[in-house]
């Protein structure tokens, strides 16, 4: 839309300015108009992702050995007393295991992109909404997308900046 407005303003500029100004006469060239693209233009996605089977290659059915086979040895292993999970911490993500099976996958914003079912998505609000569609639920701390008992939550701060992305089971249905 902005491109059209800029183009029209450029084409009509010789005619704007009052009665004393004559239109472009023969021999004069029309002004050159350079179109720009808005930084906030919606992102086009051919097809929205159906089903959330994996996040960055990790499925909620992966056991400890499968996680290590896919991602290598973790940088650190910690135990979350509240959730009861063993967290395998990698450079840009955490895999939470409960009883040796993946319970959740968390991707940090430092990753700059995520992969859902092998489809790469930049960690921007526009790219995520183009790929995942409308959120199932908008929470105070982010957007929740649900399909087939799997949920992806895009955590956001009060300014709307993405602070992380989680894949987990949706037990509410």
Image: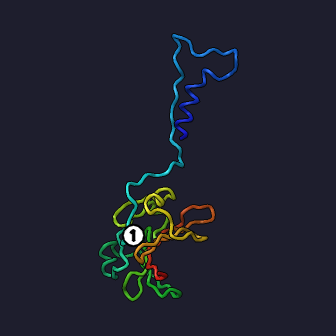
Which image quadrant for residue 93?
bottom left
Q: Nearer the viewer, residue 154 or 135?
A: 135
Image height of 29 relative to 134, above or below: above
Q: Is residue 150 visible?
A: yes
Q: Nearer the viewer, residue 33 or 159?
A: 33
Mark 1 lies on residue:
55
Q: Residue at x 54, y 49 (%)?
A: 40
In the rendered picture of this protein, how many numbered marks are placed on residues?
1
Seen in the image, is 21 located left or right of residue 41? right
Which image quadrant for residue 158?
bottom right
Q: Position of residue 109 (x, y in %)?
A: 49, 64
Q: Position of residue 58 (x, y in %)?
A: 36, 73
Display coloring: rainbow
Q: Residue at x 56, y 66 (%)?
A: 156
Question: Does dot 1 land on a helix, a strand or a loop?
Answer: strand
Q: Is residue 76 visible?
A: no
Q: Residue at x 34, y 77 (%)?
A: 67
Q: Nearer the viewer, residue 68 or 157?
A: 157
Q: Residue at x 55, y 39 (%)?
A: 2
Q: Position of residue 57 (x, y in %)?
A: 34, 69
Q: Nearer the viewer, residue 162 or 170?
A: 170
Which image quadrant for residue 72?
bottom left
């Amino acid at each position: 839309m902005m491109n059209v407005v800029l183009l029209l303003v450029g084409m009509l500029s010789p005619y704007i300015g009052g009665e004393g100004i004559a239109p472009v006469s023969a021999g004069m060239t029309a002004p050159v108009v350079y179109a720009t693209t808005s930084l906030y233009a919606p992102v086009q996605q051919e097809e929205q992702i159906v089903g959330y089977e994996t996040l960055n290659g990790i499925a909620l059915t992966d056991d400890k050995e499968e996680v290590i086979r896919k991602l290598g040895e973790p940088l650190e292993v910690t135990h979350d007393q509240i959730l009861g999970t063993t967290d395998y911490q990698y450079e840009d993500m955490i895999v939470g295991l409960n009883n040796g099976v993946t319970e959740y996958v968390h991707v940090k914003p430092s990753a700059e992109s995520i992969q859902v079912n092998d489809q790469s998505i930049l960690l921007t609000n526009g790219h995520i909404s183009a790929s995942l569609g409308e959120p199932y639920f908008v929470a105070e701390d982010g957007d929740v997308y649900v399909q087939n008992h799997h949920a992806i939550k895009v955590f956001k701060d009060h300014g709307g900046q993405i602070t992380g992305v989680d894949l987990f089971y949706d037990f509410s249905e």
